[in-house]
Each structure stands twice: as C-alpha cells, then as structure tokens.
Image (cartoon, rainbow, N blue to C red):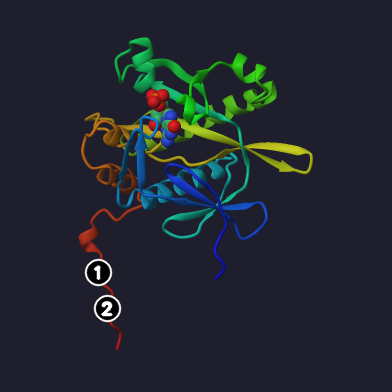
Amino acid sequence: MARRKKIYEGKAKTLYEGPEPGTIVQYFKDDATAFNAEKKDVIEGKGVLNNLLSEYFMLGLGQVGVPTHFLKRLNMREQLVRSCEIVPLEVIVRNYAAGTMSKRLGIAEGTQLPRPIVEYCYKDDSLGDPLVTEEHIAAFGWASQQDMDDILSLALRVNDFLSGIMYGVGIKLIDFKIEIGRIYDGDFQRLVVADEISPDSCRLWDIKTEQKLDKDVFRRDLGSLTDAYSEVARRLGLMPNNPASITKPTLIN
Ligand code: 5GP
C-alpha cells in the first residue's frame, strides 16, 4: 500500500491526505501536552478514547443540525473528515468560571456565570494563544462580521447540545474550546465545527462530587487520565459498563 501523505502533525493529532479530494484522515495520538507543551507525556489509550468521544459529539451535533467537518470513523484511532480552512481562533465557551478566567478575573473555580460567556483566542502557539477581542479579529481580517455572527451562534448551539448531553449523565460542562473551519462549495463558504470535541478540549466535572473528568487531571496531576476519559465514555454508553462480562471469543467447531 502506498504511504499516506502527512499534511500536518499537531500536539494531539496527525492529519493525512484522505482517499478522496477534499477529505482528510485525522489520527488521534496518545500524546498529552499542557501549558503550551511545557508538560508532555504519552497516555496509552487517550487517542482511542478521544476518537470515540469526538465521533459521538460530532455525530450528535450533525443530528441536531449543527454542521461539522466529520464524515465517519475509520478505525480505533482515525476518522475521515472534510478538509477545511481553519479560522485562526480558539472559540471558548464558559458556563462556570475555571482555568484562565478564574486567574484573570479572580473568580473562584466552579462559580456559575450569569450566562454563557464566549471568548476568542488567536491560535498561535509561539504567543501562547492570546485572548483577543472582536476588534482584533475584524481589524486583522481573521474573520468577517458575518463569520463572527455565525461563529457565535454555532458556539452557543454546541454549548446547549453538549451541556444537555453531559447533564443527562451527571456531568457539568464547565467550559470548552472549539475550532471552526471554512468549507468552500464553489464561491459559497460554509462554517463548520472542526478539529475535535473531547475531554482534551472541555472541562467536565461530576455534578455531585465535582471530580474532574477532563484534561485538568493531567495538567494538575490529579490521577489517571485514561480512567477519567473512560468514565465519560462509559457514562455515554460508548464502553461496556462491566468489561469483565465480555466473553472471550469461542471456537466454533
Ligand atoms: P482555559 O482558557 O481556562 O485554559 O481553557 C478554557 C477551555 O478551553 C478548557 O476547557 C480548555 O481545555 C480549552 N482549551 C483552551 N486552550 C486549549 C488548547 O490549546 N487546546 C485544547 N485542546 N483545549 C484548549
């Protein structure tokens, strides 16, 4: 088989040219990084879990009419997605204060916000993805006013969808980050949810115990990241509740 052409290698994923024009294969690695790659590790199984979870969220979004780049999962580590031009912004939605918002504004982590707050960061690792305003975005031409209206509406729809899904399995969606892609159909441009949606890019807390079930487990050395992500997958019905109950393959005579 011919070797696939690598298009891009990021911190958690590698992108390869897809089988059809306009498609890309997204490979989920086990690498975990935090604090702009100052902290690094390889967490066995993380890629498989994120591939499954991202598929689940992207398919669900598609079913409620939110356009995404997702086409299909190919295997345990790879999914086929539509190739798109990534808007150079990290779109963050926050329902409860945590992370950089808590630091910046001195609000205790876990404080419910008066309403969901959407923030934008300029995607540039060498600058540490700085927070920017719509003024910067318009002035530097990263997105048009029409794009920003569509991005805000997409971000809030993703928030309602994800919050509801997570609430149903006893998890509070504290905040999350999405990326937006442009897909061109001739002269016409559409914005879609791209990249991934997984516990790498969300903060997820158990509603009752406030146990963290997301990448903060790695960032803050709070235990096993795969146990946390597996718990999310298990509650969503993506993993067997009792792995011991799975019977071994039996030889048929
Ligand atoms: P914070 O700004 O508090 O660090 O992050 C807010 C939310 O966005 C968190 O859910 C965090 O996981 C996500 N987030 C922010 N920056 C990144 C990033 O560069 N990569 C990923 N995967 N998630 C991010």
* In front of the other: 243 or 5: 5
Give the quadrant of ligand 1: top left
- Measured as percent of width and height from the top left, residue 106 is found at 33, 10
- Measured as percent of width and height from the top left, residue 99 is found at 35, 22
Q: Around disc 1, counting alpha carbons within 10 Å, would you say few (fewer than 14), some (14 to 19), or many (20 or more)? A: few
* In front of the other: 75 or 154: 75
Going 25% across and 64% down the picture, which residue do you hit?
A: 246
Q: Is residue 219 left or right of residue 113?
A: left
Q: Give the quarter of the figure containing the N terminus.
A: bottom right
Q: Where is 218 relative to 74, above or below?
A: above
Q: Is residue 45 left or right of residue 181?
A: left
Task: State how far apart marks 1 and 2 are (Cα).
Answer: 8 Å
Going 36% across and 38% down the picture, which residue do you hit?
A: 33
For the residue labelled by badge 1, is the local secondary structure a helix, a strand or a loop?
Answer: loop
- Measured as percent of width and height from the top left, residue 230 is found at 30, 47
Q: Amino acid at mark 1?
A: Thr
- Measured as percent of width and height from the top left, residue 71 is found at 57, 52
Q: Amino acid at mark 2?
A: Thr
Q: Quadrant of residue 89?
A: top right
Q: Which mark is residue 15?
A: none
Q: Which mark is residue 247?
A: 1
Q: Around disc 2, counting alpha carbons within 10 Å, would you say few (fewer than 14), some (14 to 19), or many (20 or more)? A: few
- Mark 1 touching mark 2, by CB under 8 A? yes
Residue occupied by mark 2: 250
Q: Where is 108 relative to 199, above or below?
A: above
State whether residue 150 appears in this view: yes
